[in-house]
Amino acid sequence: MRTTGMKRRLAALVALAALSGCTAQGVDASGKTAAPVRIDGSLAPGKGDDDKPTTGAKGRAGTPAASEGVPAKVLWSSGDRGDDIRSAQARLHQVAWLITAPTGTYDDRTVAAVKGFQSKRGLPSTGQLDAVTWQRLKKMTHDPADWELYPYGGQPAAKPDPRCLTGRVLCVSKTSRTLRWMVDGRTVSEMDVRFGSQYTPTREGVFTVYFKSRHHVSTLYHTSMPYAMFFSGGQAVHYSSDFAARGYYGASHGCVNVRDESKVSALFAQVRTGDKVVVYW
């Protein structure tokens, strides 16, 4: 009978979900992959930063030093806020002078990091990011990726994929690392998410929620997966306490982790089996 066949397929899917699942794991420190990577905050300030102090009329790599007696133009200083500050903090993090994640606010820790960076280079140790200090820092670092600017989440949600604009959809952007819950083209809620590492990537494409489990525990990894909404084999959208604690310093084994338990709880209550899931770049 057709009904019997459908029941058998559903039972097989439920069994697969019960035997599958994902948990948190460490991630590759290389920024070359599109998967979540770890920002190594374990270095002592300045470790691995092998630039020499500035001598003569020009600094390392031809960076012009400030004219004698004429201070360099100050670009940013204590109390300033904005995307430029966030970018500067990410660059200071790259050379291990700022261990904390970027905040977008030029705080006391940023002042101390800039002072240390300047002192090692023989520049005036003011704690202010002047033009000479900024050019030196830029030459030693790369343009920060989005995950470096927002290692603990809070990145603005990406534009919805066109496939998300009709029906009931979990719209998951790997670019902005966000999930939009959308109904008929309207965004109901947004939340930060993280994905699997390069070795256990979260699948991309269009799926449907085929199984929900409020108190799910992975029998594969023996870890809790609360509010699990399975959409592809053992991959599910679910709450992750590890994500809440460590941010993007970790990764899942393929699931879409949510860090805000209250948001994923509300999402779980609204999502139905059969709702669409779109995972895209």
Image (cartoon, helix red, strand yellow):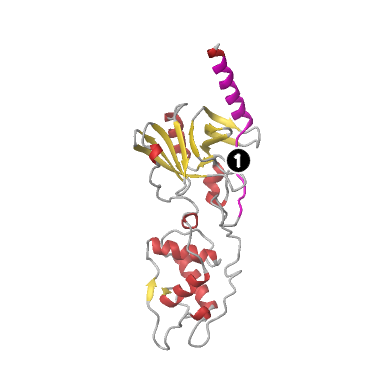
Q: How many marks are shown on the rendered structure?
A: 1
**At label 1, which amino acid type do we have?**
Thr
Which of the pair 35/23 is nearer the observer? 35
Q: Residue at x 62, y 49 (%)?
A: 26
Among the 4 quarters of the image, the one containing residue 107: bottom left
The percent position of residue 38, horizontal first and vertical second, equals 57, 54
The percent position of residue 268, horizontal first and vertical second, equals 46, 31
Q: Residue at x 60, y 40 (%)?
A: 23
Q: Is residue 257 visible?
A: yes
Write down the region rendered in magenta: 5-28
Task: Using the image, determine if residue 10 lies above or below residue 171.
Answer: above
Q: Of helix, strand and loop, which mostly describes the magenta segment?
A: helix
Which of the pair 168/153 is nearer the observer? 168
Q: Is residue 127 visible?
A: no
Q: Is 187 contained in the magenta span?
A: no
Which of the pair 234/24 is nearer the observer? 234
Q: Residues within 10 Å of mark 1 (few under 14, many from 20)?
A: many
Q: Secondary structure at mark 1?
A: loop
Task: Using the image, determine if residue 255 lies above or below residue 28.
Answer: above
Which of the pair 163/127 is nearer the observer? 163
Residue extending farthest front: 2
The percent position of residue 157, horizontal first and vertical second, equals 40, 47
Residue labelled with disc 1: 23
Q: Is 23 contained in the magenta span?
A: yes
Q: Is 102 on the left-hand or right-hand side of 30?
A: left
Task: Using the image, determine if residue 45 lies above or below residue 216.
Answer: below
Name the quadrant of the N terminus: top right
The percent position of residue 201, horizontal first and vertical second, equals 57, 44
